[in-house]
Amino acid sequence: MIFSFENKIKLFPYFVFWFIYAALHILSMRLILDIPIWALFIDGILHALLFAFLGILLWNAIQYGIFNSLSDIQKIINYTAIAILTVSIWLGVGFLLDVALLGKEDIIQITLVLPLRGLLGILLYSVLVLAFKINKDSKYSEEIILDEKYNQQENQHIEAPKTELLERISVKEGQKLHIINLHEIIYLQADGDYVQIITEKGKHLKEQTMKSLELSLPGDQFVRIHRSYIINVAYISRIEQYGKQNQLITLKNGSALKASLTGYRCLKNVLNL
């Protein structure tokens, strides 16, 4: 699934950026190329929209990739490979669209500036990577602060009496009542005052807080690795470093979840690592 951005507030300035780029592109090409303004307009809009779409895919790769666990050399290789792929697709698909929509004389003119456009693509790629990495680092810092606050709140609370452990969880969806055995649960995710229960068969939404549900689950089977996630340790596929203080937990269904420093400590205790 293609990931856009967290919300419309962040999505709006992204497309404003590409609108400004399209306008500057049209004006600059007007000074270089001797083709009609309508052809420049089509060319500029098409290339702006195409790179905007590729930028969303790039955001996806940077936000959910595990580049932080790679060596510096491997990072350079990966980012260079993605740059070549991104710019090549932009130039190739953009040129094919120009061929389909513009006249032969216009295409000859556009062909002359392809090397310049390639350099422009590299510059755009660099700007997007820098902006996305700054956003990711900022988001990472915010998560650390929230985790610290969560841990402080947990430490301040008097330990609640242990409730009776569940053997199964019931979820009412419309007129149906689903009974989910604990061994079927892959992980649980906080969703406000609700909890998303992810199983091999699908997802279920239960009206219950993570804290209350956590107290009712066997601690040797379910571990809260993050304020937003409780995982079933039986579904762990691999564990790898993510960032400076976090670990990335990959589950057998392909889900990759970040574990906070405190959550990872709890997980190590359960797994005897």
Image (cartoon, helix red, strand yellow):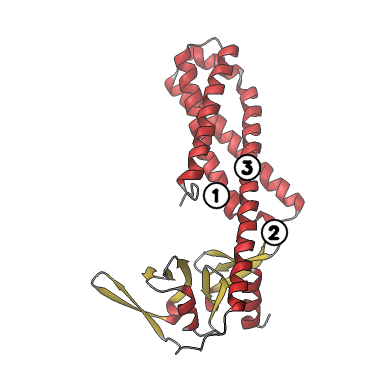
Which of 96 and 236 lies nearest the eye of the viewer? 236
- Residue drawn at x 58%, y 55% is 64
**Residue under pointer 3:** 131
- Dot 1 or dot 3: first in sequence order is 1
Classify residue 110 as left or right of residue 265.
left
Q: Residue 3: where, in percent of width, then height?
A: 49, 49
Q: Nearer the viewer, residue 210 or 45?
A: 210
* As drawn, 29 above or below 143: above
- Nearest the eye: 50 or 9: 9
Observer able to see residue 237: yes
Whole-number angstrom distance, CA of label 3 to CA of label 2: 20 Å
Mark 3 or mark 2, earlier in chain: 2
Look at the picture and state if 126 lies above or below 189.
above
What type is the residue that disc 2 sits on?
Answer: Ser
Amino acid found under the numbered disc labelled 1:
Asn
Residue 217 in the image, given as x and y percentages of width and height: 48, 83
Secondary element at image label 3? helix
Binning the other alpha carbons within 10 Å of mark 2 as few (below 14), some (14 to 19) or many (20 upward) gives some
Q: In 3D space, how far apart are the residues under numbered discs 2 and 1 (Cα atoms)?
A: 17 Å
Task: Name the residue tied to disc 1.
Answer: 60
Label tally: 3
Q: Nearer the viewer, mark 1 or mark 3?
A: 3
Place of residue 255 in the rendered image (x, y in percent of width and height, measured from the top left):
52, 64
Mark 2 element type:
helix
Q: Which residue is mark 2?
A: 69
* Residue at x-position 67% and y-position 47%: 78
Image location of residue 259, percent across then percent down: 61, 68
The residue sitting at 50% across, 18% down in the picture is 40
**Residue drawn at (43%, 86%) of the image:** 166
Q: Based on the displayed image, in which of its 4 quarters is residue 128 positioned?
A: top right
